[in-house]
Image (cartoon, rainbow, N blue to C red):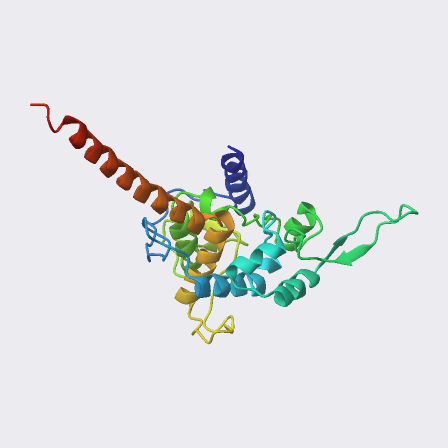
Amino acid sequence: MRKLILSAIAAAGLMVSSGAALASGAAEPLMKPGFSWEGFFGRYDQAQLKRGFEVFNGVCSNCHGLRLVAYRNLSAVGLTEEEIKTVAAARELADAPNDEGEVHMRPGRPSDKWINPFPNDKAAAAANGGALPPDLSLMAKARVGGPNYIYSLMLGFSEEIPHDVAIPEGKYFNKYFPGYAIGMPPQLMEDLVSYTDGTKATPEQLAKDITAFLNWAAEPELDERKSLGLKVMIFLAVFTAMLYALKRQIWKNIH
């Protein structure tokens, strides 16, 4: 229930910050590139999760927060303890008051939740032309289409605007965004990020990797849940076979 409520809040935040439905008409059908975690046996691709974090940390985190993810959780996407400490310490937050009641800033720690790039919502909106960048912790669950929506949105910008679509000044055309007018400018370009594993950073690769990371942020327990589900299915199959064998044994002499 708590996750459903948070998802609804995140969805509302995206609508408010981006000015949804600024033009009439529905967005284009979403692209479906296919992801490693889809299907009953699907799992996260560890290398892809780390690449996705590199995109988030180098690009998205300049405007967006990830308030439900603690820095120490990044070990699940392949970061070492030292890397996590370095990432956490890159930003500061207010420490607890000292004995004199003074509050000082301190570097982030692995135990902290992701530190927002702005001190408050008003500062965030002021730095982004009045649009409040939504927190991305649950974005993969907050919109219809989930991962496909994120992937399509990141690649949906175009300078060719249909004649029947009006885009207000300061907004950008995105054919996958409801209403087409979005406050976020195009983000992805060739070689935007230098991946540590040497993968070629094409816009399509960047979009798929950041989508994977944001899906993990919203559903980090996916692999464990599917593993448990498989074990339960195997147990039920064996248990059913045993019950059937027992039934045959009990009734074998009754005609």
Depth check, front residue: 222 or 26: 222
User: 233 left or right of 155?
Assistant: left
The image quadrant where one finds the C terminus is: top left
Q: Residue furthest front?
A: 253
Q: Residue furthest left?
A: 255
The picture places residue 206, in percent across and down from the top left corner, at 45, 65
Asked if residue 7 is positioned above or below residue 32 in the image, the reply reads: above
The picture places residue 119, in percent across and down from the top left corner, at 71, 51
**Total residue callouts:** 0
Q: Residue at x 89, y 45 (%)?
A: 101
Q: Quadrant of residue 212?
A: bottom left
Q: Residue at x 62, y 67 (%)?
A: 83
* Residue 176 seen in this snapshot: no
Asked if residue 160 is positioned above or below residue 136 in the image, the reply reads: below
User: 20 left or right of 82?
Assistant: left
Q: Residue at x 54, y 50 (%)?
A: 136
Depth check, front residue: 12 or 47: 47
The picture places residue 21, in percent across and down from the top left corner, at 45, 42
Asked if residue 87 is positioned above or below residue 95 in the image, the reply reads: below
Depth check, front residue: 7 or 50: 50
Q: Residue furthest top?
A: 255
* Residue 143 seen in this snapshot: yes
Q: Residue furthest right?
A: 100
User: 234 left or right of 250?
Assistant: right
Q: Residue at x 32, y 48 (%)?
A: 40
